[in-house]
Image (spheres, helix red, strand yellow):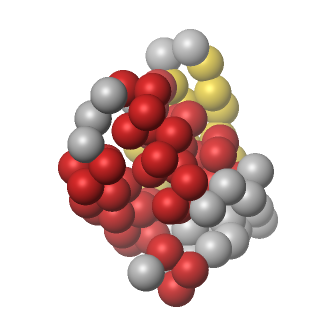
Amino acid sequence: MTLPANNVRRASSADGAIVLHLGRGTMFRLNPIGSKILDLLEQGVSPARVAEQLSEQFDVPIEVVQNDLRHFMQSLQIHGVIDSLAENR
């Protein structure tokens, strides 16, 4: 998975993040957990490990986190923030 650095800009705060896709002219907001997920993915943490960390941190069953993470990442792909989900399957 890669993040298209030339097309995406992000500003983060304690409240989450704002993501702007320059090529599409679209902007959307991430809550703090969404921003944390994007940070971890940018650092090269695998989606499987991201799910494990969130499951442990928030005491949520791993299956629930994996499903939510999969949907979130699909949304990121639709919005052009990430350009490949091949590594996430």
**Position in image of residue 4 (x %, y %):** 69, 68
Taking the spot 50% from the left edge, 61% from the top edge, the residue there is 48
Q: Residue furthest bottom?
A: 86
Taking the spot 56% from the left edge, 54% from the top edge, the residue there is 49
Pick the residue in front: 9 or 77.
Answer: 77
**Position in image of residue 85 (x %, y %):** 49, 78
Displayed quadrant of residue 54: top left
Pick the residue in front: 62 or 12.
Answer: 62
Residue 75: in sight, yes or no? no
**Position in image of residue 18 (x %, y %):** 53, 35
Quadrant of the image for the N terminus? Answer: bottom right
Residue 63: in sight, yes or no? yes
Tell how many labels: 0
Q: Could you tell whether 41 is left or right of 89 in the image?
A: right
In the figure, 48 relative to 60: above or below? below
**Position in image of residue 78 (x %, y %):** 38, 70
Q: Could you tell whether 80 is left or right of 22 in the image?
A: left
In the figure, 28 relative to 48: above or below? above
Pick the residue in front: 7 or 61.
Answer: 61
Taking the spot 77% from the left edge, 65% from the top edge, the residue there is 6
Quadrant of the image for the C terminus? Answer: bottom left
Taking the spot 56% from the left edge, 35% from the top edge, the residue there is 36
